């Protein structure tokens, strides 16, 4: 279990503030797949590893009830405090013991989270909670792209080749870095969709804040308490120099593209 990587309250707040948001278009794609085998209204969805609730919210227009669960109490406290949606609820619970009855859920969704789970226990739980024809949808993002190749190169170097390169948890390396191609799924016939991305315009300091939320960086800080932000300051300097701009660094916006990999599988209808 790697929940400690997400357990600090400051991390939950940073994550909520700086992580780019999942779009309504993304939710539509998942819901369209669910509806292919279901004509009646969609009742229950569970968002697992919901963090501060950004992923759960996108399901609210499509389901009568959405439950977001996460092992991190600070994340659930924040999600609950900010929740303005009457049909969305949050609970502290692990993916390996989903607090809903058997055969009650139309969609189990996990965004940027499934790589952390115990897959044998999680997949058994997915099978227990889904209705026949229900869907498991998992999605992630890994390497950012920029319109300028040099910025993409610097970002990749920061993530995988610089001082942080050994701080990637083995589950990230095995599952996320391979874009879930190695992920054990509970059923066959997974549909893969790589057509979408999360696109954001961020100033360089905002991008740096975003990097401060990723788990390899949190692990790097744990192992190198003397760094005191130097790694991120160097990244900021390299990115700024590469833009060739003379605009103040706080004003200069970069277009950041996070390509999404989405996998969807359906429980057989028997
Ligand atoms: C990167 S965050 C993703 C949050 C949100 N889904 C999003 O896309 O913004 C991953 C979340 O998974 C949670 N997590 C990790 N292992 C878990 C487990 N076994 N059961 C439930 N949640 C877990 C962490 O606490 C963290 O909040």
Image (cartoon, helix red, strand yellow):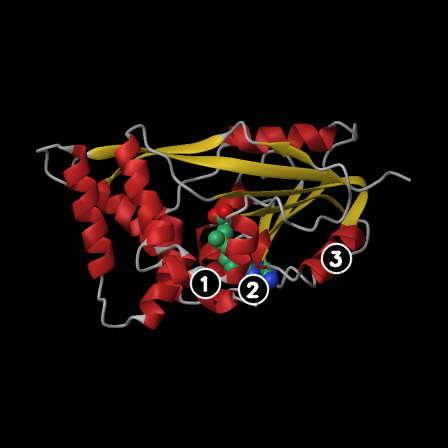
The Cα–Cα distance between marks 2 and 1, rounded to whole angstroms, is 9 Å
In the rendered image of this protein, does residue 138 appear above or below residue 162?
above
Q: Which residue is mark 3?
A: 125
**Disc ID at residue 6:** 1
Give SS at disc 2: loop
Q: Which residue is mark 2?
A: 71
Can residue 133 be spotted in the picture? yes
In the image, is 126 to the left or to the right of 193?
Answer: right
The residue depicted at 64 percent of the width and 34 percent of the height is 192
The image quadrant where one finds the N terminus is: bottom right
Quarter of the image holding residue 264? top right
Residue 125, position as x, y percentages in the image: 75, 57
The Cα–Cα distance between marks 2 and 3, rounded to whole angstroms, is 15 Å
The image quadrant where one finds the C terminus is: top right
Residue 124, position as x, y percentages in the image: 77, 57
Question: Does label 2 or label 3 sit earlier along the sequence?
Answer: 2
Question: Crowding near pointer 1: few (<14 within 10 Å), some, many (20+)?
Answer: many
User: Is the distance from the Cβ of mark 1 to the nearest ligand 1 atom less than 8 Å?
Assistant: yes
The residue depicted at 42 percent of the width and 42 percent of the height is 143
In the image, is 168 to the left or to the right of 129?
Answer: left
Q: Are marks 2 and 1 in contact (CB under 8 Å)?
A: yes
């Amino acid at each position: 279990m790697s929940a400690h990587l997400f357990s600090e309250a400051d991390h939950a707040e940073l994550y909520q503030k700086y992580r780019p948001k999942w779009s309504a278009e993304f939710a539509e794609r998942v819901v369209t797949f669910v509806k292919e085998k279901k004509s009646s209204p969609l009742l229950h969805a569970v968002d697992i590893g919901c963090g501060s609730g950004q992923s759960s919210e996108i399901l609210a227009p499509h389901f009568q009830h959405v439950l977001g669960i996460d092992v991190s109490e600070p994340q659930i406290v924040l999600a609950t405090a900010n929740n303005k949606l009457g049909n969305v609820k949050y609970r502290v619970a692990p993916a390996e013991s989903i607090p809903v009855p058997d055969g009650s859920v139309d969609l189990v969704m996990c965004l940027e989270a499934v790589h952390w789970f115990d897959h044998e226990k999680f997949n058994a739980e997915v099978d227990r909670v889904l209705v026949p024809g229900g869907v498991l949808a998992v999605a992630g993002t890994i390497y950012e792209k920029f319109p300028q190749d040099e910025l993409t190169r610097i970002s990749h170097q920061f993530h995988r080749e610089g001082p942080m390169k050994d701080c990637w948890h083995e589950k990230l390396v095995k599952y996320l870095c391979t874009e879930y191609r190695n992920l054990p799924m509970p059923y066959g016939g997974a549909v893969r969709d790589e057509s979408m991305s999360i696109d954001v315009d961020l100033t360089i300091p905002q991008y740096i804040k975003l990097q401060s939320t990723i788990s390899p960086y949190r692990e790097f800080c744990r192992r190198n308490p003397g760094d005191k932000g130097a790694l991120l300051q160097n990244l900021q300097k390299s990115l700024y120099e590469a833009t060739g701009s003379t605009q103040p660094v706080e004003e200069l916006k970069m277009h950041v593209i996070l390509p999404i990999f989405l996998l969807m599988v359906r429980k057989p209808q028997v």
